[in-house]
Amino acid sequence: MPDLLGSFKSGFGPKATLFLVSSMANTKCKLNINRSDTVMIGEISYKLKTPRNPELVPVKHISDSLPQTVVQHLRWIMQKDLLGQDVFLIGPPGPLRRSIAMQYLELTKREVEYVALSRDTTETDLKQRREIRSGTAFYIDQCAVRAATQGRVLVLEGLEKAERNVLPVLNNLLENREMQLEDGRFLMSSERYDKLLQEHTKEELDSWKIVRVSENFRVIALGLPVPKYKGNPLDPPLRSRFQARDVYYLPFKVCLRITSLSNTNHFPVNKMVSQLLSLATTLCSQESASLGLPDFPVDNLLPALHVLNAFPMLSSQQLIQRLYPYNSILGKDGRTAVEGVLGRFELLDGLRQPAPSAILSVSRTKDLEGHADVSLCVADKEITFQVPADWLHAVPTFISTPSHAQLMAEMMQSHMVKDICLIGAKGCGKSVIAREFAEMLGYSIEPLMLYQDMTARDLLQQRYTLPNGDTAWRPSPLVTAALEGKLLLLDGIHRVNLGTLAVLSRLLHDRELDLYDGTRLLRWDRYQTLKEQLQLSDQQLQERSIFPIHPSFRVLALAEPPVVGASSSRGQQQWLGPELLTMFLYHTVSPMARAEEMDLIQGLTRGVPKEAAEQLLHLTHSLRETNDPTAQSLASSLSTRQLLRICRRLSQYPEESVAHAVNKACLSRFLPSLARASLQKSLANCSLQDTPDSAELSRDFSCSIKDGMLTIGNVSAPVYSAAEKMKVPDVLFYDNPQHMMVMEDMLKDFLLGEHLLLVGNQGVGKNKIVDRFLHLLNRPREYLQLHRDTTVQTLTLQPSVRDGIIMYEDSPLVKAVKLGYILLIDEADKAPTNVTCILKTLVESGEMILADGRRIISEAEGRPNTIVMHPDFRMLVLANRPGFPFLGNDFFGALGDIFSCHAVDNPKPQAELAMLKQYGPDVPDSTLQKLVAAFGDLRSMADQGTITYPYSTREVVNIVKHLQKFPGEGLANVVRNVFDFDSYNKDTREVLIEALHKHGIPIGAKPSSVKLAKE
């Protein structure tokens, strides 16, 4: 390969040979578009043409110094371009391949049509899409057709993300430059078209709907090699139409030269730079891949170096944790392997070097708009640097702890250079830290709750119809945040499919975005350059659908830790792979130390009994610190969020026992026997025993309404004055002490402003309890039943068509939020947890975005298209307990810690007997007692696992109702109404017959049962 450094020629005569490495910036100015110009790389020359739409030519992609490797890639692309061939740049994740493609297009002044492929990409995104204007449907050309007819270059990124059999629509266009379009037109290659033009007139060809494909049309595809990375392998017919080029990471020496150019503090940072590069090169090698280590994000070394320049004393190990959080993504063997490499390159200095301890001040930068001066304290030195900011408002409701102060200081450093991702367990305070971070810098937050079946359209733009029936596109919160310079909060990045997230990679790497309606968002400086070059005003550029991304715009992602070695079949996945590593700098929210958590609890819940709080923390930290997986799963139910809820309640009701609160938070009634025993043992070790005293058992659980006050047991609450009497439930309910205890417990939490979750087996009276509870409080309710096919859209809106226009009607959820009703969500465990997880933002921050673009907010801000949440709105959620034989999803596991949980059980024998007497006053007492005793036995068998079906009160009540109405029928006959379900399962049937015979209920036709009947 000839040396290409000094071989960039332009058509200015012999003196215009320029150094591509050093003086690229000057060259760009001298590429005179008005003359017949030539670009030369090595011996290969390309004649420049004047672009028809100069605003579509990439700008500011070529750096001042182009490395030899990149120049050779550009030379190869130019060769293929001159041959008229389409190219495929294949290589590891990161922005390098896209950057090379854009540099080539900028060099040759070519217009670009860019499309990021995802698993949601369809044929219409590539060819033609139907739109409706004033009642008429017509087709609009999409990227591939526009590029072919206008002679542009089509850049397809992420071919491995597209579903199989979508991309073959391009096969004929790639091979023969032909394509049949939906609107009847036919694209034809330029040679054939020009031949026909010699024999026919242009009008004839137009009447035959033949369209010429420009001879300048090319395709540049960018993809990852599959199987090394996740994705769909290339379809052989598609693969054969491309010329491939491996674009690997830049060589070590090249990276070293680039990084040393950007480095101002030469020593000791230079030494660390070469060590970091050695680490990166090692972790990207074949040997590391065979150990199962994901690639190191080489492209993020440059932003990390800017942080090092500002903080030369920063520990390299802390920096590596942000680039490559190996403690979170790898198992024990992987961690050992990485630490071995770190040791080899002398990068294990985490303990020796000081971490930034706190943020000292944040103030507005005087001479720079949209920036803030931040001062950090590092090793007793004060260091000030500038970060993007937005300056709106700040509200101090955050209690800082030393570990959180350090995390904030580290986030500030990363915020200076790149977008951030916070990794932390459920309920550890990620959202609170993110909000505090935003408020420090005066950002307004744009929260976006991510869910599993989210599509690329949900992320970027959605179709909707205007009142006159025309179709239009509505920008998503992500796009508005980018244009207005907000902080975009991506909550739950671990849930979204990687093929959907891929559409954001260009936004996160280059701050550029192409939307479905043809709008282009450009990085601020590129937009300004374009404006100056083309001498256009903002207005003119916006008419051409080009908008700038605000320079203050930043993305903050929140995620739960990756599950090491998990298969995606269980919904858990190792989501943090090589591709995502290149998109963010990572910070881990470590669990708080006990003293810190104590300060936090006492700061946020004034009046909590100190002894109770200490006992609670002692238990929680003992569970968190064990190596026993059972105990660790229990600890996840006692997150910081849940501890704060328990302490809020203890501060109101100090006489309650801590053990009762812990059992309730962990739903110990429905834990597997091993986990329950482990919890009881831990409670005993911390000397926390839940012994209901005799006074509690004999206490009178009655309810009364007097002078507008409802009293249940010892708790009183005002009765609501409801405008909508029809919506207040009214249900037949016989009071019994156990259900009264549950209702008293619910009322305590209800008065504290909590949303409630009731979990129990089938038929134990969950709906009855809730309806009775709301009836007593006189609260109107909206009812929502979930099922397997519930989607995020159906939860929030119900589309209907009126006069040919799609109208969205509010779902019960939106009505309840607007009017301050109680939203009763039934069968919550039947819907996929990735759908119900959007309730999290509604419960936590009172915010939610609806499918029609409106948003629910907690307090009035005067923004358009908003619904203010009524202060009386509350959610009551009902779910079956997790585990067999219930076939639902683990709602409690996914969302249990944002609700106050109550376990509902069958009534105790005495209470059940009293209740059955009210249902069957004429049924003999002896019969009722037999039923209660028999069913009590069957339930304990179900708890022990002898039988699978948990027989409930509902079944006994149905038997008693039958006996009351038809007293002549024998008991043996009537109990069959319940047990015939099991008549074909031999083992279960024998167990049942034995249990029922023991209590004198004749069932099953054996001689022994006949004797029983005679008696």
Image (cartoon, rainbow, N blue to C red):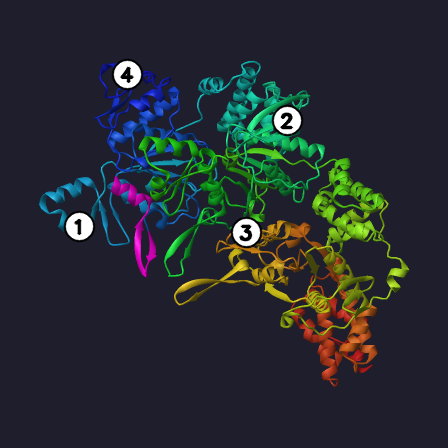
The C terminus: image quadrant? bottom right
Read off the residue under disc 3.
862
The circle on residue 871 is none
Mark 1 or 3, nearer chain start:
1
Q: Where is residue 540 in the image (x, y as percent from the top left)?
A: 33, 40
The residue stretch that appears in magenta: 129-150
CA distance for labels 3 and 4: 60 Å
Q: Residue at x 37, y 30 (%)?
A: 529
Q: Where is residue 620 in the image (x, y as percent from the top left)?
A: 76, 42
Please, what secondary structure does the residue beneath circle 4 have? Answer: loop
Q: In this orientation, does residue 408 appear?
A: yes
CA distance for labels 3 and 2: 36 Å
Mark 3 or 2, nearer chain start:
2
Is the C-beta separation of discs 1 and 2 under 8 Å? no
The local crowd at label 3, few if under 14, some if 14 to 19, many if 20 or more residues have their Cα within 10 Å, is few
Looking at the rendered structure, the kind of residue marked 2 is Leu
Q: Position of residue 258 (x, y in %)?
A: 46, 20
Question: Seen from this angle, which residue lies furthest front?
Answer: 366
Q: Residue at x 29, y 33 (%)?
A: 110
Read off the residue under disc 4.
17
Read off the residue under disc 1.
206
Residue 149 is inside the magenta segment: yes
Is the C-beta separation of discs 1 and 4 under 8 Å? no
- 137 vs 996, left or right, is left
Read off the residue under disc 2.
376
The local crowd at label 2, few if under 14, some if 14 to 19, many if 20 or more residues have their Cα within 10 Å, is many
Is the C-beta separation of discs 3 and 2 under 8 Å? no
The local crowd at label 1, few if under 14, some if 14 to 19, many if 20 or more residues have their Cα within 10 Å, is few
CA distance for labels 1 and 2: 68 Å
Q: Which residue is drawn at 47% across and 37% down?
A: 550
